[in-house]
Image (cartoon, rainbow, N blue to C red):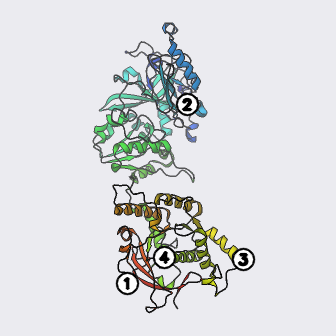
Amino acid sequence: MNSTHFIHFKSTTPTSFHHPNHKSNLYPSNNFIFFGHPSNLFPKLASLSFKSFDFSVSTRASIPRPVSEVYLEKPDDKIDDKADDKIDDTAQLKLLRLKLKEIGIDCGSCRPGQTYGLHCPMCNGGSTGEKKLALFISDDGNAATWNCFRAKCGWKGKTQGSAGVKSTYNSMNKLTKVKKVKEITERELKLEPLCHDLFEYFAERMISKETLLRNSVMQRRYENKIAIAFTYRRKGELINCKYRDLAKHFWQESDTEKILYGLDDIDGARDVIIVEGEMDKLAMEEAGFRNCVSVPDGAPKKVSSKDLPSQEEDIKYQYLWNCKEYLEKASRIILATDGDGPGQALAEELARRLGRERCWRVTWPRKNDNEHFKDANEVLMFMGPAVLRGVIESAELYPIKGLFSFKNYLSEIDAYYHQTLGTEIGVSTGWRAMDDLYNVVPGELTVVTGVPNSGKSEWIDALLCNLNQSNGWKFALCSMENKVREHARKLLEKRMKKPFFNVRYGQSVERMSEEELEVGKKWLSDTFHLIRCENDCLPSINWVLTLAKAAVLRHGVNGLVIDPYNELDHQRPPNQTETEYVSQMLTSIKRFAQHHSCHVWFVAHPKQLQQWTGKPPNLYDISGSAHFINKCDNGIVIHRNRDPEAGALDLVQICVRKVRNKVSGTIGDAFLQYNRVTGEYMDIN
């Protein structure tokens, strides 16, 4: 038998109680359900003593053990030996026991049609060795289901005794269903008014006698022991009764209807508070809130990943359906569950069923630098009713995915105002001519276009070199048109300001030395990370963004270059237009940029220009879709002069054609001088 801790009386004579619907003694044979999550009592409570009685912990086998969410027909140590002789151990039952033993469940002489509380082989009952594994054997002795109700375990599964049937640990059939709701009365349960020592017990927890009497908190004796009885009522009628011992074990009457504790207190209430335990409900009343109810079954281990079940299948939260007429009248529901993991999981499960749009949540105050108070009763005990009331009055809206308030971003707004990051209004390109037109803002998308051989890629490379030199930025390069060695040459020439070779274009100036090459190679490795296909396949945009994300997380890159659009593998579905595809692609790129605070430069070629006059194209000339200009944050056209009569051939026109954020720039043209030997772009003096 599992040890159950009760208050121990010296002076009480053992008494047997008989339920009119049962032949055997009430406690040993009556059905109970246990929903507790035992935890250490607060340090203040550990020293509790009762003066007028001699209290001690008892481990007597005759005490009914608490069992989690299952129906206990008979404790295994109270089985009638004569009845045992009449039970035929069939071959399939013997085989079932062997299978259970192989799994690690020692069911001994457990019998069909009953549920037993055993040690869980997975968690061994935790540090206290509790028997929290509920094992149920079907009436025919051919199948068994089990579930461990320790919050930190939750192991469950099923198996059958028939040959060839394998065990499963991922699902469990429903346990015994309640066929008929049992009606109970205080007289049948032998409930009594609380004794003086239990009033003192509650006083230690700041719960007054008036609150206990108004909520009909009672007690129940068993031989020389006593348990607190929380009566669940609806319209004054006793519906269920839940018991608690001093070791914080809970169990309750089986086959009764599940309802919320304190249900009559929210009849017609527009504001409803839901807590996780009866003590928290009583604590709320001490803080001035009677419109509070407690769930009867404790908290789940975690939030279910499955869709919400139907009313018939929602067994765990059936109490919500049974109290629907009370809850549907509430316009605001404050979820004040425990602050631990299971408590937060319970809040989420309640919000899923009650509607997040009308739910609020509380944040328990700090106990110290490392932890918060756990629940309402703890706050009441250590901080007082005024603080508890303030916690409820400062409850916040329950978060809804995708729905926010500016309140959630106030710190970010302050940082933006004070420019604490230094990049809020953009980083200079390094060219004075562009300072008023275009600055680089983390998290934005810049689309760059221009006719072939206008220097789009060269200009972006020069920009990256400037950003690295002035701000230490790092970059991921997905440049499909460049061979690695040629791209390295272009970048090194801009960095070292010397030609890579001393032939043709570079024969008129000094070539970079081997020492400078070694310095430049280290700079390349530290600054740039390449995204390239290792075979002849074209990369898709999702593949590029996945690797770019890894570069951000692993190497801390600040910018991504995708050059050019037409070298990507565009896996467009047959029923999707190019316009729709481009819109979806650019949306993915912008989300990546915003989420990782990474600036993206996307090179897109213009469509074939008919009767081109030599003037710069515009963003609407980009091949594919007008979404290139519609969705980008910045749009730039690079244009190089090809007409000697129109001006110098090294003159490059930077046409800023779109700037979404006026803080970072504006529309206009800038002119830079291109050095063909080193690939540098320089301001014109």
Residue beneath disc 2 = 51
| Mark 4 residue element | helix
Residue beneath disc 4 = 456
Q: How far apart are marks 1 and 2 (CA)?
A: 104 Å
Alpha-carbon neighbours of circle 1 within 10 Å: few (<14), some, or many (≥20)? few
Is residue 135 toward the left or the right of residue 503 in the image? left
Q: Distance between the residues labelled 4 and 3?
A: 30 Å
Which circle marks residue 342 in the picture? Answer: none
N-term mark: 4 or 3:
4
| Mark 2 residue element | loop
Nearer to me, 432 or 129:
432
Q: How far apart are marks 3 and 2 (CA)?
A: 89 Å
N-term mark: 4 or 1:
4
Nearer to me, 319 or 430:
430
Nearer to me, 426 or 92:
92
Q: Can residue 467 be seen in this view?
A: yes
Nearer to me, 639 or 405:
639
Which circle marks residue 613 in the picture? Answer: 1
Residue beneath disc 3 = 515
Q: Which of marks 3 and 1 is in front?
A: 1
On screen, 492 above or below 295?
A: below
Q: Can residue 78 be seen in this view?
A: no
N-term mark: 1 or 2:
2
Q: Nearer the viewer, mark 2 or mark 4?
A: 4
Q: Mark 3 and 1 residues: CB-CB less than 8 Å, in contact?
A: no
Q: What residue type is labelled 1?
A: Thr
Q: Which amino acid does label 2 sit on?
A: Lys
